Image: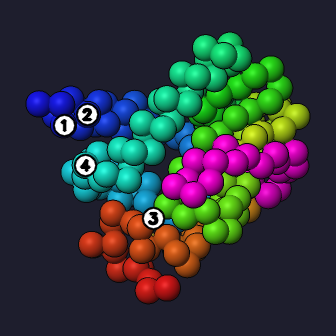
Amino acid sequence: MIVEIVIDWRLKELEKHRKLREEDAIEVTDLIRCPLKRDFEEKFPDLYKASAYTPSTILGSLVHLGLENILSKELNAEIEVTREKRVGDHKIVGRIDAKLGRVGIEIKTSRADFEIPYEHHVLQARIYNWLFDLEKTVLVYVTPDRVTEYVVEEDIDEDEILKLIVDKSAPRYDWECKYCFFSLICPKKRRK
Ligand code: SF4
């Protein structure tokens, strides 16, 4: 059954993502989302894996796969590039979707095209500019109503990274709980 193959592929992708973090490493995505999520992913792996079955995340992964393939073939871009850097005692690790010399490309899918680029995506692009020593990162959005791109040239300094590491506000953004798999068990769940 094709659906089984798709789910199996998504589960492998999630596992690949989980392996990116060693125990002492902080992943870039952990700096731009609710800090409780990482703990929950480790404590409740089955709930984390449930995201493999969500149609919107499957769609997002397929868009990533397709666009990365095009960028690799047409522009000879490096795909899914990983890098780590130290800030004080912390090791930051990130994986950008594509890289073309000193230009990063990060693919985003969204249900709606209002208010893009989102604040947390711009923050992620700024962290990638620092982590990968980039001149800029292009955020490419694929939504049902618009396909567009935004260039982020600013980077971030180490003080701001340290502030993000110690900031344990949960959620980090008001809207996060609405889309969070862990809202089923989370004591900090907020209604927007
Ligand atoms: S439900 Fe809200 S507060 Fe709880 S983990 Fe999810 S985003 Fe964070």
Point out which mark residue 127 bears.
none
Disc 3 to disc 2, C-alpha distance: 28 Å
Residue 73, quarter of picture: top right
Q: Which residue is mark 4?
A: 53
Report if the beta carbon of the residue with label 3 is closer than 8 angstroms to ligand 1: yes
Q: Is residue 172 left or right of residue 41?
A: right
Q: Tell me which numbered mark, 4 or 2, is placed earlier along the sequence.
A: 2
> Are the residues flagged by discs 1 and 2 in contact, CB closer than 8 Å?
yes
Which secondary structure lies at badge 1?
A: helix
- Give the mark toward the camera: 1 or 4: 1
SS state under label 2? helix
**Which SS class for mark 4?**
helix
Residue at image mark 2: 6
Q: Residue at x 82, y 56 (%)?
A: 159
Using the image as rendered, state which of residue 163 and residue 126 is in the foreground: 126
What is the CA distance from the residue labelled 1 to the residue labelled 4? 10 Å
Query: Reading the chain from its start, which is encountered first: label 1 or label 4?
Result: 1
Label 3: which residue? 36
Q: Which residue is mark 1?
A: 3
